[in-house]
Amino acid sequence: MLSRRQMLLATGAGLAMPALAYADEDRSLPKKGKRAWAAQVPTIHLGMLGGENDADRLARYGAYSKLIEETFEVPVKLVLAADYAGVIQAFAAKQVEASFMSPAAYAQAWLESNGNVKPLFTSQEKDGANYYVAVLYVRADSGITSLEQLKGKSLAWADPNSASGYLIPRSEFRAAGIDPEPGKFFGRTGFAGGHEQGVIAVLNKQYDAGVTWTSGVGDPAEGYTRGNLRMMAEKKLLKMSDLRMIWKSRPILNGPYVVRADTPSEFQTDMYQLHRAIAKNLPEMFHSVDLGSSIDWVPVKHEDYSVFIDLVQAEAAQRRKR
């Protein structure tokens, strides 16, 4: 069972930005040319988590993947996954070299690959924050205005390997005395297949409520500054006036960009340096890939996410009890 300290850390209470280990580093774009590590990594496979439709994911990553190809003179292959588990399993099978991940997906990938994933950096907001929140939403016309009113109603989880869309809400519900198992507090729960799909399912009245991720700051009418709701609103898939937010979590540390730990150290360094350069020099590409109002990618380490491993293991223990 998690201690109170672990619970607070897992949900970001008092969260501080990890120390910048490379504050004086060169942020210019790397020189183009094939590296020696290409003999071991002849193709860079980039995993792409599910939760957004394939066409939009490919469009956002087009110029980004081309830049990686042109910089290191090796082909880049985008590995699309229907859900988070697809990328997690690809890491365990050594079928991808790098990916953006949620904190819970990182924890699961670390466990399933026996530690063969390494976090390099995460997103930092304008105010220095490096977190987001989970929100619980319902249809604006549902008449539901509080979590308590969802008793006996249906709830759509986003993905079993999502921090905001599953792990953190369940943890916080339990801490508040609400059993998240179906038939306990909620009448019915299920997985929507992703964050975007969860919102659509609620709007189509397949579920009464859903959970997703957002920055939690900014104008709610615009979908906040960053997150799934902002993306859907900008793509005209959602009118924010059709939803009502009735609960939000404590802050959650932003997910990391990870590489396989068994790739050459020079490859890991080059990928880190290229992304730090993108954040500083190519703002349009940075925002397209990073999804929102962040201003930088800053370094993180495994220890920053270790508490999520505890949460994943605790959730697995709960499943074994069922």
Image (tube, grey):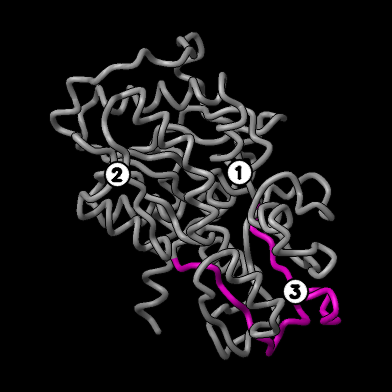
Question: Is 138 displayed left or right of 191 in the figure?
Answer: right
Disc 1 residue type (three-letter): Leu
Q: Are marks 3 and 2 in contact (CB under 8 Å)?
A: no
Indicate the secondary structure of the residue bearing disc 1: loop
Give the mark, 3 or 2, whose residue is nearer the N terminus.
Answer: 2
Q: Are marks 1 and 2 in contact (CB under 8 Å)?
A: no
Residue drawn at 24 percent across, 20 percent down = 34
Indicate the secondary structure of the residue bearing disc 2: strand
Q: Disc 1 vs disc 3: which is toward the camera?
A: 1
Residue that numbered label 1 is attached to: 291
Q: Quadrant of the C terminus?
A: bottom left
Q: Are marks 1 and 3 in contact (CB under 8 Å)?
A: no
- Highlighted magenta segment, given as a residue range: 133-160
Indicate the secondary structure of the residue bearing disc 3: strand
Disc 3 residue type (three-letter): Val
Q: Which mark is residue 138?
A: 3
Residue that numbered label 2 is attached to: 45
Disc 2 residue type (three-letter): His
Residue drawn at 46 percent across, 35 percent down = 64
